[in-house]
Amino acid sequence: MCLTCMCVWDFFSFSSEAALRIRIKGERAPELQLELQDDDRTNLFLTQLKSAQEEAALKLIKSKPMEPLPPNAHRSPVPIPPQRAAGRSAANQPPSSGSLQTGFNSSTSTNQNTDPVRSLASDFGFEQNFCHALKVEEKKNNQNRITASREPPPVPSLPPRKTPSAPTNPVPPAPIMKSKATSSVGFDTSAISGAKSESLSWCDSPTSNSMRDTVFLSQTGQREILLKHIMSKRENEYVDIKNFRFFVGTWNVNGRSPDSSLGPWLSSDREPPDIYAIGFQELDLSKEAFLYMDSSKEQLWIDAVERNLHPKAKYKIIQIIRLVGMMLVVAVKKIHVRNITEVASDHVGTGILGKMGNKGGVAVRFVFYNTSFCFVNSHLAAKLEETERRNQDYKDICARMIFNMPGSPSLSIVKHDVVIWLGDLNYRLFNKDCGDVKRMISEGKLKQLLKFDQLSIQRQTKRAFSDFIEGEINFIPTYKYEPKTDFWDSSSKNRVPAWCDRILWRGNKVELIEYRSHMELKTSDHKPVSSIFNIGVKVGDDQRFKKVFEETVRQIDRMENDFLPSVSLSKTEFFFIDVKFRQLQRERFLITNDGQVPCHFAFIPKCNQSQYCKSWLRAEPSDGFLEPKETLEIYLEVYVSKDSVTMLNSGEDIIEDILILHLDRGKDFFLTISGNYLPSCFGTSLETLTRMKKPIREIPITKLIDLEKSKVKFLIGDGAANEDRPLKIPKEVWIMVNHLYTKSCDQEDLFQTPGLQEELQHIIECLDTSIPDSIPGCNHSVAEALLIFLEALPEPVVCYELYQRCLECAHDSRLCKQLISLLPRAHRNVFRYLLAFLKELLKHSHNNNLTASLIATLFASLLIRPPPSSASRQTQQDRQKAIDFVLGFLMAGDEE
């Protein structure tokens, strides 16, 4: 047999007399089957064969040592389950030589002297001599190399549906579990501890022991997940708490450029901070910034910050994130940069449609040594009476701010050791006269005034920021001043002074040193605010870590030999009643670890699917760890958004899914999800709606499906032939536009202030179930409902097939009008009706603060959308052409 060829050898049977049969394959040799005695000569033969394989493989493969990974946050130590990487790990694996590699690093390496302890220690943040600046793709590849693949379990088939209507509560047949050969890697604990493994063996034969390792030991990726979990539980045994100084500042700059030094704000203390987190609001007040356009003022303020950081230290900016007027800058001392890992950022707009960035938040998270931090800079809804809207903005930011990092679970704001929230929170003083407030300020009665502070009241009543802490306020209100002065606002609006600009925190070992305003800076109508914190950070000790690490490895060995994980679920079948568009429903169940070892669980995708569930379903949490006897509550959430409503309306999808809950080294559980969906006019095509003279809920589901698929020619509705004609525009569009036309032409900030979620749900329900004479809710809620309706249309008002022509003719008003005439009847009528209404709004711009540019920017993104297949390739130039297209109609004369 040629030893230079690739050899594959495996053990496929045992005999009771300690004899074994071996099958040997080679690329240029016939398959051989040998039966050998389990003795020293056989062991010598197998050793020589394995050695020859490795030598041949090394000639073919020149693989590099795997670079260590940046450390993970210990607060949430659950990496991505190995089975989720199964699809891509094979592509990233180096070619296998067929031999089994022992140790924690399963990738082939030419460096045979690599210390496994140092390799894993670097994964926990204790190795100082490696580069933390891995590229994202390299990080993915490295994680894939140490993750063993797992074939997804079989998917149980759904029962046949007898009728096209929504099922009641189908129960799938019991899944058939296929036996799968486990890809296993043996762990040589002696490489770490210098001692022999304490695992039990089938017999004293070393050959049998190696075979047992091959067949039964767990996969590397699963073992490392468990290892990290146990190490995080024992971190108090190898970490020390070291205090570091943090500067946190916030300033609403009112759209102005820096005109003076920021030194009195950023570097007024003797001792330089270790880390800066600096937030700005209203960096850019231009209406066009609604769609996240670049701001010329961004770099001006960044330069001003860099010039005015504390002169006694050198700093490096590690992250900047901006959303329209909100910007957050994080800078650290250069000596600490190597200890900053897992940097990520995200933004959430809470303006119109829940995404416009005139209000919302930006955030940056990172891990410093072994402590995770999250800084949130927000600008909440304005005006004295909008307390509930501010509370809603806070809840939206908490729910939607998600940090996604390659190879790790998504993290929300609260899943960090320390969270610091700063910004113009816009909470005012309840029911206080402006003159009385100014008098009490001049008399120094700040504590009495703070009894009327909206934020303090919302925290006490647990409506917002209930688990955050704020320092004692000993400075006068920071809003509202005449710009360039220290005088209170003297405009006709006569704003009541208020503490709009705040800094709060949550977490342990956080000590507030200073909480103050900076009256010296007069650029804006707000004064900047800052806090100085001493925060205890977990810093690891290498020697103690190594000791705990070795103990943990031996503990895992014993657990793997003696026990298998086991959990029980309180419920596996779930039915959601009357699922509606944009209305969240939740069901919960309990998962209990009834075994004797810690276990890791995760929802995993079904075969040939990339996600573990359909788009309208989510599990929270979707993975996690359980200690023995520990119970965790898991919520299943059903929420029909614009992305899933059309498929449900048309009957192409139903509320039915099966979730696979996988237990590492254990069995899979199958959860049945079902329910009934109530169709909505939101997400239904314009053509279908014009053929409905009744509310959509009164239309039989079978006829609704036929209408949506255009398979029938009849029209819904009773009466004579004239009454059978389709409506010129959908009645739902007319009802909303007529309400706005008659009641809100003079409404201030129309289409700029978001509606209330509760009112939006009432409006949607009203349009789905009736033809109302009036719509419930305020003008802002009706305005946003109209925008949501347009955004949810399966085919935009300007059809996908005309999108490119629309961009090409945007410069020529004559060509634009010709293109509109090519639209289908319902689309053409809706476009003309909406544009007539918007032109009427512009006649009241002195009251509603609307401009043609603002309306065109907002409605162009709804009326003219690129086809889904090319949406990701849409450029800023394309967006501007769409805006110009709408703007041309808005600026045209009434006769056109």
Image (spheres, helix red, strand yellow):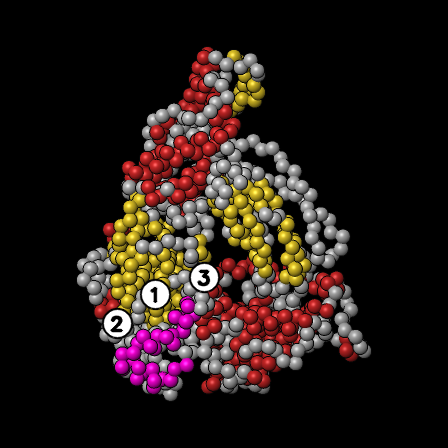
Of badges 2 and 1, nearer the viewer stands 1
Q: Is residue 749 above or below residue 211?
A: below
Element type at marker 3? helix
The Cα atoms of the two marked residues, 2 and 3, are separated by 29 Å
Of badges 1 and 3, nearer the viewer stands 1
x and y percentages locating residue 126 in the rendered image? 31, 42
x and y percentages locating residue 821 in the rendered image? 63, 75
Question: For residue 40, which quarter of the picture?
Answer: top left
Task: Please give left or right for residue 495 compared with residue 572 in the image.
Answer: left
Task: Please give left or right for residue 275 compared with residue 145 in the image.
Answer: left
Instruction: Let me know if residue 450 is in the magenta part.
Output: yes
Q: Is residue 297 above or below residue 73?
A: below
The Cα atoms of the two marked residues, 2 and 1, are separated by 18 Å
Quadrant of the drawing holding the C terminus: bottom right
Mark 2 — residue? Answer: 518
x and y percentages locating residue 518 in the rendered image? 26, 72
Q: What mark, if any, has residue 470 been given in the picture?
A: 1
Q: Closer to the N terminus: mark 2 or mark 3? A: 3
Which residue sits at x=54%, y=79%? 779
Magenta highlight range: 431-460
Instruction: Let me know if residue 498 is in the magenta part.
Output: no
Mark 3 — residue? Answer: 398
Three-letter amino acid code of the residue under disc 2: His
- Marks 2/3 in contact by CB < 8 Å: the verdict is no
x and y percentages locating residue 239 in the rendered image? 31, 44
Element type at marker 2? loop
Disc 2 residue crowd, few under 14, some 14–19, many 20+, Cα 10 Å: some
Q: Closer to the N terminus: mark 2 or mark 1? A: 1
